[in-house]
Amino acid sequence: MTLRKPPLREVHAERGASFTEFGGWDMPVEFDSIRAEHRAVREAAGVFDVSHMGEIEVVGPDATALLQRLTTNDVTELEPGEAQYAGICREDGVLLDDTVVYRLPDERAGDAGPAYLFIPNAGHDEQMHERWVDHRNDADLDAEVRNATEDWAMFAVQGPEAPDVVAREATADVLPLSKFEATFSEVAGVECWVARTGYTGEDGFELLCPWDEAETVWSAFADACEPCGLGARDTLRIEQGFLLSGQDFHPEDEPHTPYEAGIGFVVDLDTEFVGRDALAEQDEVGIEESFVGIELLERGVARHGYDVTDEDGHVVGRVTSGTMSPTLDKPVALGYLPVGLTDPGTTVNVVVRGSEKRANVVTPPFN
């Protein structure tokens, strides 16, 4: 299979980046070192090329109704320039993906109606575009649905110094934006959608700019802060306990509902979305297992797929993500355990290469 390439693939190669396949894309995994890039984001600022993320535009009189039908949060609460985190579920409540939905300024749609942009995870854009089109047609809704993934490049500038880094390049006053607020602004002379969102646990912005003007915007930030790859993005999000679609949940390999995956806060049962009835039932009867943090107390690194055992050696759960935390210099992991074993401080074991390593259950973020 031919890998999709971000617009700056060769620019990153010239900078010395190493690459990995992710979600069908050929993406930089590191530029200098994962540890150095991780530290830059925690202590100063780093810039990530996240152009592998999808972009789906939904515009029209029934755009709100369509998004309300297919995402778990309440889209009607969004004013222009606001965003919300949401799940995308099957009828049985199992997560297909998680996403951020942006309400674009009304003038972007003109007389066509409300305009939205939502962000599927890497490799999911075609699936979600098809899903939205099918539901639109089935419900006879008036909305245009367009897969704009290869129209937009996307960069994330993250870290305690990131807001000032972005503000220096933006013509609009972006510093007053609160979390999950966004605006259009010129950045390095290029019109961008600038959102106070991110995936690292640090302050900062995610910026969307036209695909063919990506290098101008990237260069403005790569000269001002550390270029970072997906390796550091992964260690940063694991430390915060953030889900990775396709790994911490997957509709076939790791099927979980938002309640089980620890994001029940994105479920609004007062709205009629696909999967709502199944989630209402689960909300009433409770869940059997839950997403937790796990901190190893012995030498070893927990990896995706490793078993978690109880004090009697019985397999009770599994690791979905794990790393050696660069910030804390200790092994941390994420995974699922029965609700009876999810209290912070509960002792479990992670089976690392056939050997049980003692560990404690913790509530992320790790510290």
Image (cartoon, rainbow, N blue to C red):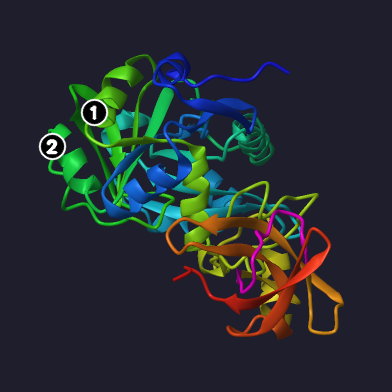
The residue labelled by disc 2 is 168
- What's drawn in magenta, residue-wise? 294-307
Rendered image: mark on residue 264:
none
Give how far apart the Cα atoms at labels 1 and 2 are. Answer: 13 Å
Residue 320 on image: x %, y %? 69, 57
Determine the image quadrant of residue 334.
bottom right
Viewed as shown, does residue 203 lie left or right of 91?
left
Mark 1 secondary-structure assignment:
loop
Question: What residue do we see at 42% from left, 55% from top?
Answer: 76
Percent x, y for residue 209? Answer: 33, 26
- How many neighbours does mark 1 have within 10 angstroms: few (below 14), some (14-19), or many (20 or more)? few
Residue 342 image point, x, y percent? 65, 80
Mark identifier at residue 223: 1
Q: Is residue 222 visible?
A: yes
Q: Is residue 145 visible?
A: no
User: Mark 1 is on which residue type?
Assistant: Asp
SS label for mark 2? helix
Q: Position of residue 271 (x, y in %)?
A: 55, 62
Residue drawn at 59 percent across, 85 percent down: 345
**Image quadrant where one finds the C terminus:** bottom left
Instruction: Please identify, in this view, whether the residue under mark 1 or under mark 2 is nearer the observer.
Output: 1
The residue under the point 12% across, 43% down is: 173
Above or below, 360 relative to 43: below
The structure residue drawn at horizontal position 74% and vertical position 74%, both measured from the top left corner, is: 349
In the rendered view, does 218 fall on the left or right side of 130?
A: left
